Image (cartoon, helix red, strand yellow):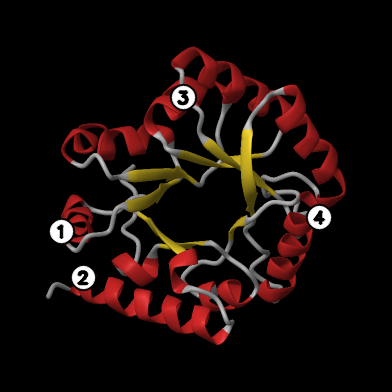
Amino acid sequence: MGQIAENLEIIHAQIAKAAHDAGRDPYDVQLVAVSKVQPEARIEEALAAGQRCYGENRVQEAQGRWAERRAGCPELKLHLIGPLQTNKVKDAVALFDVIETVDREKLASALAKEMAKQGRVLPCFIQVNTGEEDQKAGIAPADLEDFYRFCVEACGLNVVGLMCIPPVDEPAALHFALLKKHADALGLSQLSMGMSADFETAIALGATLVRVGTGVFGARVAAPH
């Protein structure tokens, strides 16, 4: 067994234990392997080990990595987990299966128009800036309900859940609990939260998707300049 296959086995075991400990079904938690800036060999090993759900931050990078692979792997699921510029919406809708980072009205409108044009109805997550950090994308918690209504009622987006990236210097659990509270208030069942260092905590607090990069692939390789 290769290192990445071994890592995946360990992560799945940790997911199962965290779910059991929380009284949840492990099958209700999906592993999104964060494949950004990973070498081709690592991607191939993960695919060979059976991993089919991947998260990418940048549309252009994801196109180079996945566009050709899609044809030979119809069960592949690609999640956009990084900020999306409106000029990349056409390519994003064509390539990805899930958009996790809807965070402003202009983007919601552009996504709705492009999905209609391409005949695709992609599940979307609203990214919530739970720490209200100036440098971080996401809708402020106070604006979430109105923004959700805009996405669903004005744009007709298929909003299935919420996503967050907690501040690095605060306990993640507080932010996961806050996201769960908001999701419950809106009647949303999906929560994308938790990364390599804290996904077990996220599962205990209701995560249905965990985004794990380093835990699966090892240390990130620096992007070429």
Q: Is residue 54 above or below residue 112?
A: below
Q: Which is more N-terminal, label 3 or label 4?
A: 3
Dot 2 lies on which element?
Answer: helix
Q: Which is more N-terminal, label 1 or label 2?
A: 2
Dot 4 lies on which element?
Answer: helix
**Label 4 environment density (alpha carbons within 10 Å; few <14, some 14–19, many ≥20):** few
Which amino acid does the dot numbered 1 rest on?
A: Ala
State which quadrant residue 73 falls in: top left
Can residue 89 be seen? yes
Cα separation between marks 3 and 1: 28 Å
Pointer 2 residue: 5
For the point 59% across and 82% down, the residue is 22
Which amino acid does the dot numbered 3 rest on?
A: Arg
For the point 62% across and 53% down, the residue is 163
Pointer 3 residue: 120
Q: Which is more N-terminal, label 3 or label 2?
A: 2
Counting from the top left corner in percent of width and height, residue 221 is at 31, 58
Pointer 4 residue: 185
Mark in the foreground, 2 or 3: 3
For the point 73% across and 69% down, the residue is 177
Mark in the foreground, 2 or 4: 4
Pointer 1 residue: 48
Which amino acid does the dot numbered 4 rest on?
A: Ala
